[in-house]
């Protein structure tokens, strides 16, 4: 892989879907399950195996368990839906929706969901992920830590977020009233640019993927050094000047 490919790299749809699923135990995420006409919210009630199967831990009297036991062959059709909610308060906080269709199989202590169709819906559009590709993909290494990393950056280092806007083109910052960290993964950081009535996202890619927190810290320091060497965008300068009047 050459430098340009590394620089522009971003999570693929399969890895993004697995990241949504891996982090969905958090209270910041929501999950609902539909089977045989019944629907239940299952926030924090599931775990995920390495191959992408979902283990649902539901009460003995759960309607889902009843549907799974009573259905023919013990494999009713079911749909799992997850909403990925941004950890930092921003306009339109849902970053993605993940919909899994498949078979729900009852076992002694839980229900096992085998996904056969995976659809990831993001602002850029919906993508169908192959079941085998989904099973083989691994979640981003920072999927579980992302919420804490972003809230720390937003709350403890707002000056760093402001400095990073120097890496954003003036056109993207035109009319900006607030900039917040929206997402981070091993490939880069995404900022949400909010205007009075609209918003947009800008991605700041790392010079190389990060696989652990030490590497992620180094990548962020490189971005801040690059921002320190860049001039303040004219659009942001005008915004500050207007705000000082």
Image (cartoon, helix red, strand yellow):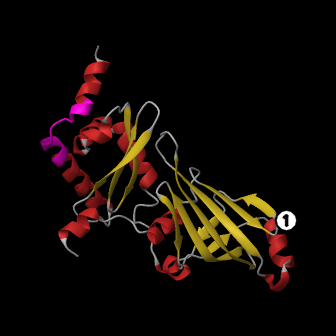
SS of the residue at dot 1?
loop
In percent of width and height, residue 52 lies at: 56, 75
- Quadrant of the rendering where the N terminus is positioned: bottom left
Q: What stretch is highlighted in magenta?
A: 226-236
Task: Name, please, the residue furthest toward the top.
Answer: 245
Q: Quadrant of residue 114?
A: bottom right
- Quadrant of the rendering where the C terminus is positioned: top left
Camera-side residue of 49 and 127: 127
Name the residue at 52% across, 73% down: 129
Q: Does the magenta stretch include residue 235?
A: yes
Name the residue at 45% across, 73% down: 138
Q: In which quarter of the image is residue 206?
A: bottom left
Name the residue at 47% across, 80% down: 136
Task: Characterize the local packing of mark 1: few (<14), some (14-19) or many (20 or more) Cα atoms within 10 angstroms.
Answer: few
Left or right: 195 as drawn, with respect to 96: left
Task: Name, please, the residue furthest toward the right.
Answer: 70
Report which residue position mark 1 lands on: 61
- In the rendered image, is residue 34 in sight? yes
In percent of width and height, residue 187 lies at: 32, 62
Left or right: 194 as drawn, with respect to 114: left
- In the rendered image, is residue 161 in sight? no
Task: Name, please, the residue furthest toward the bottom.
Answer: 73
């Amino acid at each position: 892989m050459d430098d340009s490919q590394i620089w522009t790299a971003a999570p693929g749809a399969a890895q993004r879907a697995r990241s949504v699923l891996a982090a969905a135990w958090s209270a910041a995420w929501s999950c609902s399950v539909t089977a045989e006409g019944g629907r239940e919210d299952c926030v924090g009630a599931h775990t995920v195996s390495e191959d992408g199967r979902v283990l649902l831990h539901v009460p003995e009297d759960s309607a889902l368990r009843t549907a799974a036991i009573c259905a023919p062959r013990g494999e009713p059709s079911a749909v799992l839906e997850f909403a990925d909610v941004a950890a930092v308060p921003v306009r339109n906080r849902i970053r993605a929706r993940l919909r899994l269709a498949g078979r729900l199989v009852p076992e002694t202590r839980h229900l096992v969901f085998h996904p056969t169709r995976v659809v990831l819906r993001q602002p850029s559009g919906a993508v169908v992920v192959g079941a085998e590709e989904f099973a083989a993909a691994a979640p981003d290494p920072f999927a579980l830590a992302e919420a804490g990393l972003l809230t720390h950056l937003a709350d403890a280092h707002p000056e760093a977020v402001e400095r990073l806007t120097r890496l954003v083109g003036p056109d993207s910052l035109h009319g900006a009233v607030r900039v917040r960290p929206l997402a981070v993964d091993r490939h880069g950081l995404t900022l949400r640019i909010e205007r009075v009535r609209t918003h947009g996202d800008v991605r700041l890619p790392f010079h190389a993927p990060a696989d652990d927190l030490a590497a992620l810290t180094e990548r962020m320091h490189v971005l801040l050094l690059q921002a320190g060497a860049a001039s303040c965008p004219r659009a942001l300068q005008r915004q500050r000047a207007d705000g000082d009047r």
